[in-house]
Image: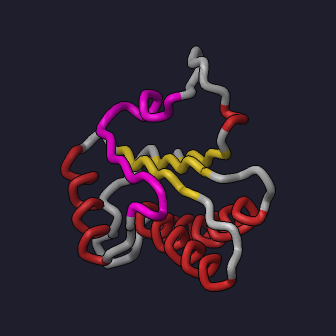
Amino acid sequence: MFEHSEAKVRLLDLYIRKYLNILSRAKGNEKVNLYDLFCGEGIYENGGEGSPIIFLKAIKDIYYRNQASGQKIIQVDCVFNDLETWKTEKVKSIIEIKKLHYPVFGDLRFRNVDYAQAVPYSSGSNIQIQEIQSFCLY
């Protein structure tokens, strides 16, 4: 893992945990959409965790923390996208092996399209971004 990749993943982990924590406590938020548009393989060659793994660990931790403390639980629907199918297949495999996702957390989808097509409310769409809290990682 390159030094800049390690810094990006560390910052992403801190940010997504705070972001999901805030949204899970805010009134009116029942669901969050999370899009990782260039998800890669999920694990770097040196074993470092990539963004899909960081996202799912944060979602799982916040779900169980909120459940244990009686806090509101929000659904987090994830879309992991990469043009190369083998990369999303590898991510799927890692998620299964590490048991990082259960349907109770939200939907989990994988796509292999150009990043501009991976988000349903890009320009010209009639779905408004304000309807559901969303986070896109480019």
Tell which of 26 and 53 is nearer to you: 26
Tell which of 1 and 35 is nearer to you: 35
The stretch drawn in magenta includes residue 113: yes
On screen, residue 85 above or below 46: above
Q: Residue at x 57, y 45 (%)?
A: 136
Q: Position of residue 126 (x, y in %)?
A: 60, 18
Residue 133 as seen in the image, left or right of residue 46: right
Residue placed farthest to the right in the image?
Answer: 27
Instruction: Give the image quarter of residue 11.
Output: bottom right
Q: Residue at x 29, y 61 (%)?
A: 91
Q: Position of residue 33 (x, y in %)?
A: 56, 47
On screen, residue 35 above or below 21: above
- What color scheme is it? secondary structure
Residue placed farthest to the front in the image?
Answer: 70
Q: Is residue 74 visible?
A: yes
Instruction: Give the image quarter of residue 114.
Output: top left
Q: Residue at x 56, y 64 (%)?
A: 8
Instruction: Give the image quarter of residue 111.
Output: top left
Q: Is residue 3 visible?
A: no
The stretch drawn in magenta includes residue 134: no
Number of numbered discs overlaid on the protein picture: 0
Residue placed farthest to the bottom in the image?
Answer: 68
Q: The magenta stretch spans which residues?
A: 103-120
On screen, residue 28 above or below 74: above
Residue 85 as seen in the image, left or right of residue 46: left
Q: Position of residue 105 (x, y in %)?
A: 48, 63
Q: Residue at x 47, y 29 (%)?
A: 116
Tell which of 56 and 70 is nearer to you: 70
